Image: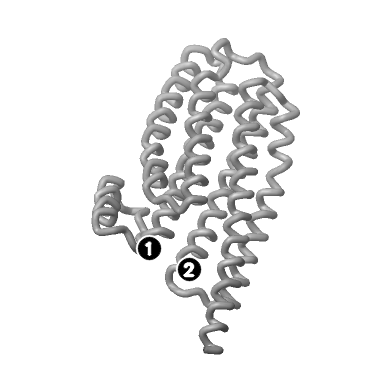
Amino acid sequence: METADLTHHISRRFNEDLERVRSKVLSMGGFVEQQLQKAVNALIDGDSALGEAVALEDSKVNNMEVSIDEECSRILATRAPAAGDLRVIVAIIKTITDLERIGDEAEKIGYIASRLATMERPADKYREIKHLGRVVSQMVHSALDAFARMDADSALNVARQDRQVDEEYESIQRQTITFMLEDPRSIRRALDMMWVVRSLERIGDHAKNIGEYVIYMVHGKDVRHTSLDDVERELRARHAAGGGT
């Protein structure tokens, strides 16, 4: 009986540790999401101060990553989690790495936005970039929501959106190259635009990664090198069989 009580006590303490870490991940994700939105807004609005502020706040993202990583290491060392809980810790460590990299890309966009604010904005006010930024921001938001709810189906939908991001990225790249050929004076701005859309495309990749970690947490399956159609078929089969890990 004493052993059972001790096991229950350890399990409850472990769950508290796990919830605290998951909460920290969501706080980090929320901050990174804001950084991304501010960076894109700084570009579109020609707001140099906002772009600089985003770039300078990247250190906060780095500090959050280090703090969560240390907490995960402590849990691994002191709690010896079982298979399912171990998966959650591994997925969290991977997730914060991708969140930190999203922060890095937002920092790049912030610096570029600050520089471009000194130039006259184009007539379309970066319409395509504004749209791509909205799509990518929604991907990050949805990936974090799937993480919070441990929702593998929503996570799969996030991964599927990455294809749209890749297509828009390639389309904007082609347009930008055309502008450079037509007007050599636009080359400096065009190159900066290519860096921005490249950063947005990479953020989409990181959001997709987070979605894949959610599927791993829920089902114990690494789907990073599996076609999305195959993943969807397997998830349907699991639902039909009554779920489970």
Dot 2 alpha-carbon crowd within 10 angstroms: few under 14, some 14 to 19, many 20 or more: some
- SS state under label 1: loop
Residue at the far bottom in the pictured view? 2
Q: Quadrant of the C terminus?
A: bottom left
Q: Is residue 188 left or right of residue 145?
A: right
How dense is the environment of label 1, judged by Cα within 10 Å: few (below 14), some, or many (20 and up)?
Answer: some
- Tally of numbered discs: 2
Question: Which residue position holds label 1?
Answer: 220
Alpha carbon separation for disc pair 1 and 2: 10 Å
What amino acid does circle 2 point to?
Asp
Front residue (pair 165, 76): 76
Q: Are marks 1 and 2 in contact (CB under 8 Å)?
A: no
Which amino acid type corresponds to the residue marked 1 in the rendered image? Gly
Image quadrant in which you'd find residue 166: top left
Could you say where residue 52 lies in the image, as x and y percent from the top left? 73, 33
Residue at x-position 39% and y-position 54%: 215
* Residue farthest toward the front in the current orientation of the protein: 1
Q: Quadrant of residue 83?
A: bottom left
Work out whether residue 220 or residue 224 is closer to the camera in this orientation and state it: 220
Q: Residue at x 67, y 54 (%)?
A: 64
Residue 36 in picture, x, y percent from top left: 60, 36
Is 181 located above or below residue 135 in the figure? above
Picture coordinates of residue 183 (x, y %)?
52, 13
- Way the structure is coloured: one colour
* Residue at x 61% of width, y 44% of height: 30
> Which mark sits nearer the N-terminus, 1 or 2?
2
Label 2: element kind: helix
In-image side of 53 versus 244 (left or right): right
Up the image or down, 7 lies above or below 177; here it is below
Q: Which residue is mark 2?
A: 85
Q: Is residue 193 above or below residue 31?
A: above
Horizontal side of 202 relative to 32 (left or right) equals: left
